[in-house]
Amino acid sequence: MLNKLQEIEKEALKAIKKAGLPDHLEQVKAQYVGRSGILNDIIGDIGGLPKEERPEVGKIANQIKQKITASLEIRHKELSSSASSSGYSQERVDVTALLHSKERGSIHPISQVQAEMEQIFLSMGFDILDGPHIESEFYNFEALNIPEDHPAREHQDTFWLTCGLLLRTHTSSVQVRAYKTSEPPFAAVIPGRIFRYEAVDASHENTFHQIEGFIVDTDISIANLIAVLKTVVKEIFKRDIKIRLRPGYFPFVEPGYEMDFECLICEGEGCSVCSRTGWVEFLGCGMIHPNVLTFGNIDPEKYTGFAFGMGLDRLTMMLYKIDNIRIFQGCDLRVLKQFSSPSLL
Amino acid sequence: MRISLNWIKEIISLPSDIFDTIADEMTMRVAEVEEVIFQQEQYKHIVIGRIKNISPHQDADTLQLVVVDTGDADCEVVCGAPNISPGQTVALALPGAVINDTVVEETKIRGIQSLGMILSERELSISDDHSGIMVIDDSLELGTPFAKAFGMDDVILNIDNHAITHRPDLWSHRGMARELAAVYGIRPPKELDVSLMEKGELTIEIKDQDLCERYTGAIIENITIEESPEWLKKKLIACGIRPIYNIVDITNYVMLEIGEPMHAFDADKVTDRHIIVRRAEDNEKIVTLDGEKRTLTTSDLVIADPEKPIALAGVMGGKSTEITPSTKTIILEAATFSHVSIRNTRRATGLQSEATNRFEKGLPPEITAAAINRACDLIKELVPQTRITAVVDTDYSSADENKVVLTERNIRRLTGADISVEAACRLLTSLGFASLIEGDIALVKVPYWRKRDTNIEADVIEDVARLYGLDKIEPVMPSLPNDPAYQPSMRILEKQLRNILSGACAHEISTYSFSPQNMLQHFSFTDQDHFEIDNPLDQNMRKMRISLLPGMLAGFIKNIPFFDKLDLYEIGRVYHKAPLDAEDLYSNEKNILSLLTFRKNADTVYFETRSFADLILNSFNISFSLIRNKDVPDTHPERTAVIKAQDNSDLGYIGELSPDLCKKVKISERVGVIEINLDNLLPFAAVPRSAYTPPPVYPSISREFSMIAPEELDFSEIHDVVAPLNPRIKDIFLLSLYKGKPIEDGKKSVSFKVVLIDEKKTMSDEEANGIQELIISECASRLNLELRQE
């Protein structure tokens, strides 16, 4: 009887292997392990054996049944995953072909980086403010502690309108406008377009973009300034980056600083990107000059504040490794279409 | 500005182990160092040699083969200089030396091996002379490195000029030495002696005291004009100034040392030795040292004698009183000119110089005396037989002192660091400030050289913080206002529009806020509506835009050759000219969305364009109607509609650019255009939520209609007739428009579908048929439509 069982096992496994279509496999299954299959017949015969042999033979019969069932399953999977046997070969498509593309447009890189920066500052609790591009001399210069004969006016070559107004040379011009509207505390950023009288080449534009930021409250300090800038840089580059302040001169802040961050390429060792200094100049900042607060009707005895201004174009160039600032106003779709974006927040 | 550390070391005892850190320390505490130049590196692989013999180059007439003895070896080089002769001692660059940013290598010149290069003064950065090789003193030992032989062992810091805009005191070696002493905590330099012993006679008359506070002059007789000694020339070279002859070199030297630019006149050419400082007259003429004849205005300040102007004050001397090799007597000038006047004249003439750089910062009047004294001493030292016959001072400067109250509370409050008033005053003392401390308050007296930039407490705290060390201040996050951060709704709208349009395959571009004249001229805008730029960069960019279209069209045209379809949009500001108060400026600027569309060889541009408008407006659930309008400027009269909101306000328009305009700008295809006034859109877009409508309970019935209509009938007219006919009409939409056979000329076929739902019960076919008949009869009677016979 055992011999017979082993023979059935061999036959069954062979038949399973040979089955080339799911239907064939179903037949094999019915023939051997179905309700009225060969194995069940034999198991039914076990009752006719001597009492002491029954458990042993029963056990083996069951083992063989399990083995065949397992093989059936494996073979079933093999057959159903194989295309050749699915019967759908007529329906095969070129799965790599793109015929009806869902095209997506692009968002200007400056818009993208500006939106990203706005999101960072909003999440930190800064309001976003806006102001005019065409400015008065008062808000662009005088209120920022840059009187008529100040040398700093030269560093900011200005487009003047025939009516005596000017094109703002920085978004700092919105500072005093903002101060006049309410009482501190303030925390705000002003992103936007600015203008400088400058001939255009690969690294100079007459139209570019800036984010001015400031906080004014009763006891705002340099220590606060450093902490906020450190967080901003970390959020932009998504990792901790060393920053440093060093003396710099801007008439609307006192003390005034330049902020550098450690070069991302060489990590401070010095390379061509950072002119071998290990640091990349990033923005100008400082403690808001008391005269500026006063122009905004804020009592400088009671309140202090810091301000900073960063160039969005330079940041965008850094982030996308762009070496020619002219692409921003260049309208060349062959360039701009590369700047797809899932969506702005 | 270049600072020589050898020079600094003569003023203070700089520690010797600082060369690795000095640039960083300066950058972190004083002003940015852009570059550190080690002269020994600069002159590496350049040695002293002697020309042994010269033979002609077989293949080139202008070149010669020169054998140079470098002590232990002979070196053959090819040289083209006209002034070489055997026995000359020369500077020889060997392979590895860097000349004009190029590495010298062994090379073949016209087939002959050359092992180096004999250098000119220009190639050695010693002067501008490149007329021939530099011939050197014979006493030097052959093979000696050039840097060693000439003592070129200086280290030079190149300071960023912008970083010291507000610090006239830092435009000198003495000023920088004072800062370095404070940075390194070493003994500060001895103060300048600013007293003056007047003697002799020289008439100095300051007519415009607002432009010249002080003028100090000296007459020096019996001078000899000759070359300066090596030590002096070396310092000038290190600082990037070309040595010329002793008197000029000394005035430059004093400027570099003390910070006061000086000038020297040939005294015999100054009428009556009478110096007058006055505003120029309008149209007054002067020939300056560079030979240029310049026409002046009353905003220029001149130095004059009773007959003529003899110098453009602080900017450039005059040709008429120039020093020549035969000059015997000079008048030396050290004066304090108004920085505003100097800047105006410099801008008008373009004559920027080391002197104007300094004057424009506003120099302290105190230093004119020190400069005159120092220059006289140096002249006496260089030309011992000279006699100083007059020293005269005319001084209208005020002797006011700046005093600042410094409180410990404010030091801590502004820096956020734990700095006591005593510690602060110690740091300030090292910079020459004097202080009187009482409790936690100090009265700080500002030294005269810092009067210009130090007026308030924050100015003083700036010095305290940088000397204390900005890197020692621990960052502390401020507590920000508790209100939720605010974002202007226009900014949100702009971002939403970018997402909508770029999600629908349009591309954002950005153009200048100036309208390009070469495009603008083809549009129908009027000149008076534009703000005009007084100083445009180029005449094509003179007007501020009142529409995005001229600029966008210029960008659009550039892209046409490369694409079969284009959908470009811009979101930007326009600026309509109006008489404005400073406070109205912002509200006068309007935000516009414009889109330009093009499909190669397709007549469907209008409909492509319209679908963008629908997409935008539907995204915000804005109900709108399109009103045909023939009068939108610069658009196609038959293909343009104004977009009206529910309250009948204008949101903008959809259309095609006028064919005339396209022709003028040489576009042969149709261009679709949308302009949406975002300020008008904003109130509708800001409330995009409409009330929820449950799905219909009863099934709908649809009926399709195909009708023959007059060609000029717009679908909106059918819609307006059909919609109010029965409350069960829920939707009417266009299926197709067709013109051509078999439809007769002047007519078109319009197919549309009407969806009917009864909200109270299931509508029967009979009821639907009744409405259908009504629609057909009303369209026939009111719009002259006839049902199309299949």
Image (cartoon, coloured by chain):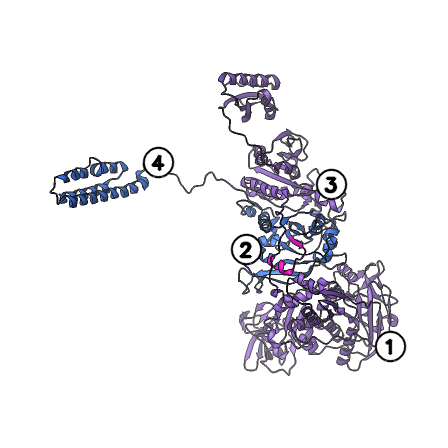
| Residue that label 1 marks | B200
Q: Label 3: state its secondary structure.
A: helix
x and y, in percent, of residue B703 in the image: 51, 21
Q: Label 2: state its secondary structure.
A: helix
Label ID, residue A90: 4
Answer whether labels 3 and 4 touch (C-beta < 8 Å). no
Q: Are marks 2 and 1 on the same chain?
A: no
Q: CA distance from mark 3 to mark 4?
A: 68 Å
Q: Amino acid at mark 1?
A: Gly
Q: Amino acid at mark 4?
A: Gln
Read off the magenta span. A212-227
Asked if residue A145 is among those painted magenta in the image, a careful observer would answer no
Q: CA distance from mark 2 to mark 4?
A: 51 Å
| Residue that label 3 marks | B529
Camera-side residue of A287 and B10: A287
x and y, in percent, of residue B760 in the image: 52, 21
